[in-house]
Amino acid sequence: MWRYRWHYLFILPMVVLFVAFTAWPMVASWVYSVFRWSGYGPMNDFVGLANYREAFSDPLFWNAFRNTSVFALFAIFVQLPLALLIAMVLNNSALKGRNIYRVLLFLPVVTTTAVVGVVFAILLDPSGGPLNELLLSREFLDRPINFLGSESLALPTVLVIDMWKGIGVTIIYWLAALQTIPTELYEAARIDGAGRRQMFLRITVPLLVPLGVVILLLTFVTSLNAFDIVKVMTDGGPNGATDIIQTYIFRYAFDPEGTPRFGFASAVGILFGVAVMLLSP
């Protein structure tokens, strides 16, 4: 260790930051979760597992858990295959201007989520929003649609916008995976008379499976981080229709209208973290 002391010195800042902002908060959350604590002052009110029992008995917690699961399922069964389809089109060397299309599809990824949420909230506004005005002017509607204020439409609307915002990353993953497949395999299959469907099923799919599992896991984990777009666009409303675990935790941890319940919020965060670990392969 003395021989490589300078190496340890150079990684010391990273270790300090990791302990301060990742390791310690994780450990501290377990401690906070067994106290009735507002986040201020000493922790004197030990309640054991009472916070966990309260979370399990709260229907709002299960509603938020269900909505979070919907985000994950939508990402897996809609975003993932759609991104693969787009990636296969962009991977075609015969497509002119494919680099431009890649940039346009990836542009929303690097756009600030808060800006995306505010812009779409304005576009979808039932009172003079451009989308409603366009549909009304073309006589597709007889009255405006409240996309974000309807309990039946709010969640699908946020799901689609969240997918538009993040699908570029999944497309890049699939493009990287597709480019690991040797083109000679397709050329040999084409010479043998194989069609596009056969080449996809017999060459593309089997060779994509190993990397596809990784992409599936990355997409699943990313889909659980929809706090920013939900917070900006609906804040979990209307009536909890778009409430997810992160907005549920935020509401209890930093409640501006009452006394924050940091201990309860920590317990919910731990329950959610354990659930994610169990669901992730």
Image (spheres, rainbow, N blue to C red):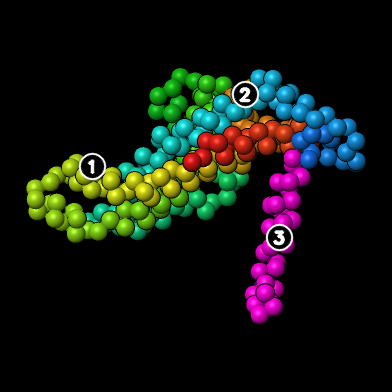
Q: CA distance from mark 1 to mark 2?
A: 39 Å
Q: Is residue 29 magenta?
A: yes
Magenta highlight: main SS: helix
Left-right relation of 279 to 268: left
Q: Amino acid at mark 1?
A: Leu
Tell me which corner region of the image, top left, top right, bottom left or bottom right, holds residue 16: bottom right
Task: Name the residue located 74 percent from the left edge and 51 percent from the top edge.
Answer: 24
Q: Earlier in the sequence, mark 3 or mark 1?
A: 3
- Can residue 6 be seen here? The reply is no
Q: In terms of secondary structure, where does tag 2 sit?
A: helix
Q: Is residue 218 left or right of residue 267?
A: left
Q: CA distance from mark 3 to mark 1?
A: 47 Å
Give the residue type at disc 3: Leu
User: At which x and y percent is residue 280?
Assistant: 51, 40
**From which residue to which does the magenta span run?**
1-30
85 or 128, nearer to the observer: 85
Q: Which residue is mark 2?
A: 62
Dot 3 or dot 2, earlier in sequence: 3
The type of residue carrying mark 2 is Trp
The residue at 41%/52% (across/down) is 173
The residue that label 3 is drawn on is: 17
Which numbered tag is attached to residue 271?
none
Label 1 sits on a secondary structure element that is helix
Q: Is residue 5 left or right of residue 50?
A: left
Task: Identify residue for label 1.
Answer: 201
Q: Is residue 105 left or right of residue 30?
A: left
Residue at 72% x, 24% y is 53
Q: Say what secondary structure mark 3 lies in.
A: helix
